[in-house]
Amino acid sequence: MLISDLDCNTLKTHLSGQGLRFRTGPFSVSLRATIPAIARHIAKLYPHSETLDNDAFIDFHITTHQVAGLRRWLKPQVVFSFDGYKPFKPLPLAQAAAAFEWGLNWCIASSSHQYLIIHSAVVEKDGQAVILPGSPGSGKSTLCAALIHRGWRLFSDEMALLSAADGMIHSVPRPVSLKNQSIEIIKAFTQEPVWGERIEGTTKGDIEHMCAPDSSVRQPPTAIHAKYLVFPHYQSGCLTEITPLSKGRASMNLIENAFNFNILGHQGFEMVSDLVDSLECYDFTYPDLKQALDGIEQITSAKP
């Protein structure tokens, strides 16, 4: 059964009771929440996620709840907790959906050390996967959002999961988080996506989440060997430039974008080395979305 098979009342009953149990990529989540914005977010942006039975193993027991007392009325806030632990300070109640998404990112990055976790989008087409690491402002999520509406499959918008067991990238297709001007760029680019509610005034600016294409979510969790490592850099007014990267420089850049490299230690170093040795690596600077899409097409269609 999928989340979309649950009517509104049933969904709310699960969320407010023992928890809505569902799968996202290789992870199983139990979410408890009585905040209406969370219910709307899950219904709209996770419709094709598989629900799980009550006896299913759960990786992350998550609760989002409104702060009680006077703050409930004077300054409403939301608290995110994982197995009873509260890793963040309360956020404004209007940011509840963002708190869930950021919190789930934290759960994965802080506890899933069977993977080297890279801050990166991953897209795939015709068996060729591209890893797109990116710091804030690089245009990673904007480029990812455009690619998955031009024939590419979404593996992840936020993190590449490189398995220590098989050296493959594992898929975790969740909503794509877009910020500020990127929201309007993608809305002008395609009419296809389903969007969540606008969340204004976060520490990252205004945010909207774009639903992952059902074609990416409905496929069973899969893994693939990546072929390209591309570091995107949006720079207004610049010339498009695609520069091959040495293996050493690519490795250092990748390490800088890995959440848990220090935790994995020597194993993490070996995983980075093995991954980079198998990839074509590029630095990619572009001035706008069209040039970005053309550049990715140029990189991935080049003859060996």
Image (tube, rainbow, N blue to C red):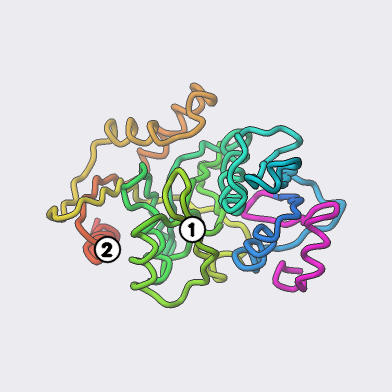
Mark linked to residue 176: 1
Question: Which one is nearer the viewer's eye here, 13 or 158?
Answer: 13
Q: Is residue 119 above or below residue 288?
A: above
Rendered location of residue 247, percent (x, y): 28, 35
Type of the residue with mark 2: Leu
Query: Which quadrant, please, contains the N terminus?
Result: bottom right
Please give the name of the residue rendered at 24% of the width and 65% of the height, measured from the top-left corner: 294
Please give the name of the residue rendered at 62% of the width and 50% of the height, measured from the top-left corner: 93
Please give the name of the residue rendered at 60% of the width and 43% of the height, measured from the top-left corner: 103
Kindly tell me whether residue 80 is visible in this rendering: yes
Question: Does the magenta segment cover residue 4?
Answer: yes
Question: Which one is nearer the viewer's eye here, 73 or 226?
Answer: 73
N-term-proximal mark, 2 vs 1: 1
Please give the name of the residue rendered at 82% of the width and 51% of the height, measured from the top-left corner: 56
Q: Is residue 299 above or below residue 273?
A: below
Q: Is residue 17 rendered to the left or right of residue 201?
A: right
Task: Compute the Cα span from label 2 to label 1.
Answer: 16 Å
Residue at mark 2: 289
Type of the residue with mark 1: Val
Question: Secondary structure under badge 1?
Answer: strand
